[in-house]
Image (tube, rainbow, N blue to C red):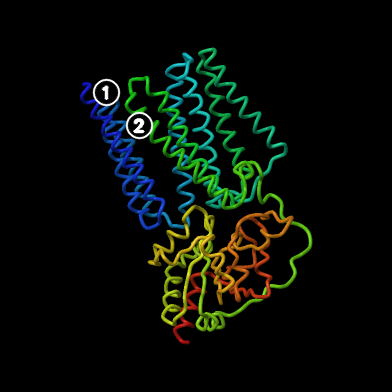
Amino acid sequence: MSAWNSDLVNAVYVVAILVFILGLKAMSSPETARRGIVFAGIAMLVAVAVTFFISGLSNFALIALGVIVGGGLGFYWARVVKMTAMPQMVAVFNGMGGGAAGAIAAVELLGSLAGGATTALSLAGAVIGSTSIAGSVIAFLKLQGWMRSKPIVLPARQPINLGVLLVGVGFGVYAVASTTTLFLLPFFLLLLLYGVLLTLPIGGADMPVVISLFNALTGIAVALDGFALVNGPLGDAGYAMVIAGTLVGAAGSLLTILMARAMNRSIANVIFGAFGATEETGTPIAGQLKPIEAEDVAVMMAYANEVIIAPGYGMAVAQAQQRVKELADLLEQKGVTVKFAIHPVAGRMPGHMNVLLAEAGISYDKLFDRDEINDEFANADVVLVIGANDVVNPAARRAGSPLQGMPILDVDKAKNVIVIKRGQGKGFAGIENDLFYKDNTRMLYGDAQQVVGKLVQALKKS
């Protein structure tokens, strides 16, 4: 390929990267997130297409087959996946990225173990990529319910994990030192094992943070592989990988930090703390659960001045967002002010509740995050909690609770709290909820979609 063509390819990469940045910027707001995703998709399509024009590229048929099969499966899965299964899909796609980065590193290492900076970068990419894909698989299995969601804590897990990591890296270093590719097999196997062991002790409540972390690690692995490719025959693609990987790594790292901060916990505590492995013990919660009927709740809300709705994962599971929209519309027709309180980690992934409510046609100006809405709970006549648990648990204010210090929605400060819940079980973190036993709280049991449907029908008759 001529120098002119090479310059043209690089120019197209630069444009694609700029569009990626615009897409990331647009994703920072719910109102422009869809546009941002479209921008990022177009940029990726352009970047993949122009890669076919890089000098030295071969096996076009195999590459095209991979693009068609992978793109087709991704398109189909994205079209049919339910919103409740979106976290699992994100975990799988993160894992695919990590696996791709690990595979690229493996090809580079098998091609040359000459040492130097290029080999070191390939080893680093292999370590991070292999850990990411193995950990993402475990995250998927836990979120999908095919594996116990609570932490699986092995005896002496920290020394064992560290030993597996060090021995695995040692095999990689020895493979380079001895220029023997045979030692790459235990290198990759032990790193995959490390990813599994690292993720097993992490409970389902922490999976949103873990998915975001693995996303960041995948980006870093891609960037490292890009650095390794820069000086090779596919150097143009290497530059694109470096920039794209760095963007993903930076965005994923920032999101991971923000989510950990929303739970008032460090990333180290999320990864190594085995949160939820042991349940809280001590004095039983004072009070008792007090059930209420849908008709009584409808009357209570119809005569309220302000109703705040706090949705959680239970609403997503029940696919109740359309009914919730209908309920909000009816209340507003009766002169009731309706607002939605969104906790940063409600659901199983960032923005989960925002997407569901927007999908139902609820205006963004009615959605308020925790910091914006917390001061209003004391003035609210009714707070309707739909399938949320840990993010509304006042136990976070109690010393000795596993949730101590976690910022929550202060729903318990409202005049009346109605909790829609399928049963009397504990939340995803496995911790009893003090809110359910408060004097101002009533429990409305049942599937969220059916229960909200009953509220709608009762309001229409009132």
- Secondary structure beneath dot 1 equals loop
Query: Residue 315 placed where, x, y %?
Result: 50, 65
Q: In this image, 233 relative to 443: left or right?
A: left
Query: Residue 224 placed where, x, y %?
Result: 45, 28
User: In the rendered image, which residue does mark 1 sit on?
Assistant: 55
Query: Residue 65 placed where, x, y %?
Result: 31, 35
Q: Give the quadrant of residue 359.
A: bottom left
User: In the rendered image, which residue does mark 2 sit on?
Assistant: 240
Query: Residue 377 placed where, x, y %?
Result: 57, 70
Q: In this image, 79 relative to 134: left or right?
A: left
Please name the amino acid that badge 1 sits on: Ser
- Above/below status of 396 relative to 209: below
Please name the amino acid that badge 2 sits on: Ala
Q: Residue at x 55, y 82 (%)?
A: 300
Residue that lies at the very extreme toward the right in this rendered image? 283
Q: Residue at x 69, y 40 (%)?
A: 154
Crowdedness near tag 1: few (<14), some (14–19) or many (≥20) residues, C-alpha within 10 Å:
some
Disc 1 to disc 2, C-alpha distance: 15 Å
- Secondary structure beneath dot 2 equals helix
Q: Residue at x 62, y 24 (%)?
A: 167
Residue that lies at the very extreme toward the bottom in this rendered image? 462
- Above/below status of 129 relative to 422: above
Crowdedness near tag 2: few (<14), some (14–19) or many (≥20) residues, C-alpha within 10 Å:
many
Mark 1 and mark 2 lie on one chain; the one further toward the N terminus is 1
Q: For residue 130, which numbered disc appears in the image?
A: none
Q: Give the quadrant of residue 19.
A: top left
Q: Are marks 1 and 2 in contact (CB under 8 Å)?
A: no
- Above/below status of 370 relative to 308: above
Q: In the image, which is nearer the foreground, mark 1 or mark 2?
A: 2
Name the image quarter holding the N terminus.
top left
Q: Nearer the viewer, residue 295 or 257?
A: 257
